[in-house]
Image (cartoon, rainbow, N blue to C red):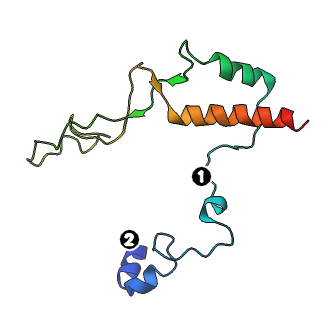
Amino acid sequence: KATYDSLKSMDPDVVVENSPLKPAKYSGDKTPQKSCNLNLENIDRVPSWTELQQIISSLDQHNRWLMSHVMISHPYIGDGQKKEPTDKYASTYVGDETDTSPYWNDTGTKYISTEKYIENMRLLINYLQSIKQK
């Protein structure tokens, strides 16, 4: 509260002076895409032979990597019709059937996951590149 009160009394321009959220011209020495690594795991990791076999064997009969308990959203079916104020969805990820916000699917339904596809393909490519370099 004390920090909030002290910031509240300051000039707003001084408070946000060095904020990373403030729009500004990029001044890094590399391109923004190369200076910021958004990957949660090492994308240069080469999988072991055992892991490679597990990745390949995890494909289903249609050659897809399926996952359950992923983020999904309702398909767009038009603008919402409910206009009255409500707290009904205040503590949920998603509102009624017209809300297209992503939410965790907690059923056992399996989905094609872009995240899993990218992760597995990156590992397979890394493996192939590693044996090509030998």
Q: Is residue 1 above or below residue 75?
A: below
Disc 2 secondary structure class: loop
Give how far across and how far down residue 89 sits, in percent. 22, 41
Q: Which mark is residue 38?
A: 1
Residue at 70% in and 44% down? 42
Disc 2 residue type (three-letter): Lys
| Residue 72 horizontal side relative to residue 55, left or right | left
Residue receiving disc 2: 1
Residue 13 left/right relative to 53? left
Image point (75%, 39%), residue name: 45
Quadrant where the N terminus sits is bottom left
Residue appearing at x 85%, y 32% in the figure: 131
Which of the 4 image quadrants contains residue 127? top right
Q: Tell me residue 35's x, y (percent).
A: 66, 62
Image vertical order of residue 99 relative to residue 131, above or below: below
Q: Amino acid at mark 1?
A: Leu
In terms of sequence position, does the residue under pointer 2 or pointer 1 come before the other? 2
Is residue 118 or residue 11 the one in the foreground? 118
Quadrant containing the C terminus is: top right
Placement of 93 over or under 9, stated as above or below: above
Residue 55, quarter of the rendered image: top right
Residue 102 % position (x, y): 36, 40
Relative depth, front residue between 66 and 19: 66
> How dense is the environment of label 1, judged by Cα within 10 Å: few (below 14), some, or many (20 and up)?
few
Q: Is residue 15 above or below residue 82?
A: below
SS class, disc 1: loop
Image point 62% across, 47% down: which residue?
Answer: 39
